[in-house]
Image: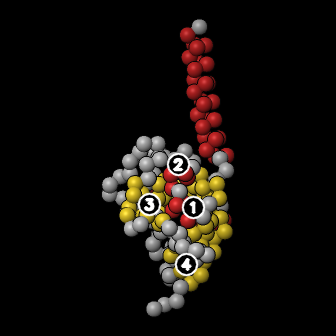
Amino acid sequence: MNTLVLASSCCLLLLTGIGVCWSVESEKPEEVTLCDLYQHPEQYAGKMIKVRGGSVSGLEIEDLLHDTPSKPCPAYMTIVVVFPHQVEPAPGFQLVQDEAQKKLAEALRSSVAIKIEATYAGRFDAAYVWREQKRIPVSAQEGKHPAQKQDWDGRIVLRQVFDVWTYALPRK
């Protein structure tokens, strides 16, 4: 009887764990703009998002640059992109290893300065937003308060990259 209860409990725990992994893996990212993230970080905090942005080689995978908008965005965040293995605790998903990811990795290792444009999909974490020249904490992330000594306002824990486009920057 005890063995049956123990075996049932183990199976239930295993199935629950698999269900959580499947839900993270199958969660379709919400397509947003950088300005959407800047203006409403609390709305996207902790969620899977997909956003287009740019960076420059030699910075590793760093600041996303705002594409030239049709109108200025009233808020701003320094958003970095990090790989899942760089995050504690682990995010519950792995980086998709495909051709786009390989192209991004090559671009990041380039010996010449290049501009990298790509669409990034992953979990958005928000800590601060800049509004009216003030850095304001984002409080909607399940009661968590951001670390004091970080150099980002928001981050994307990368799950997958799409549409990588690169071009060489002119030498100065």
Residue drawn at the location 47% of the way across and 47% of the way down: 140
Reading the image, the residue beneath label 1 is 36
Graded by Cα atoms within 10 Å as few (under 14), some (14 to 19) or many (20 or more), the crowding at tag 3 reads many
C-alpha distance separating marks 1 and 3: 12 Å
Spot occupied by residue 125 in the image (x, y as percentages of width and height): 49, 53
Lower sequence index among marks 4 and 3: 4
Q: Residue furthest top?
A: 1
Lower sequence index among marks 1 and 3: 1
Residue drawn at the location 61% of the way across and 75% of the way down: 70
C-alpha distance separating marks 3 and 2: 15 Å
Please report contact status of discs 2 and 4: CB closer than 8 Å, yes or no.
no
Query: Is residue 32 visible in this depiction of the protein?
Result: yes
**In this picture, residue 92 sits left or right of residue 136:** right
Lower sequence index among marks 1 and 4: 1
Residue drawn at the location 67% of the way across and 46% of the way down: 26
Q: Amino acid at mark 4?
A: Lys
Quarter of the image that includes the N terminus: top right
Select label 1 or label 4 by which is in front.
Answer: 1
Reading the image, the residue beneath label 4 is 115
Q: Residue furthest left?
A: 149
Reading the image, the residue beneath label 2 is 46
Q: Amino acid at mark 2?
A: Gly
C-alpha distance separating marks 1 and 2: 15 Å
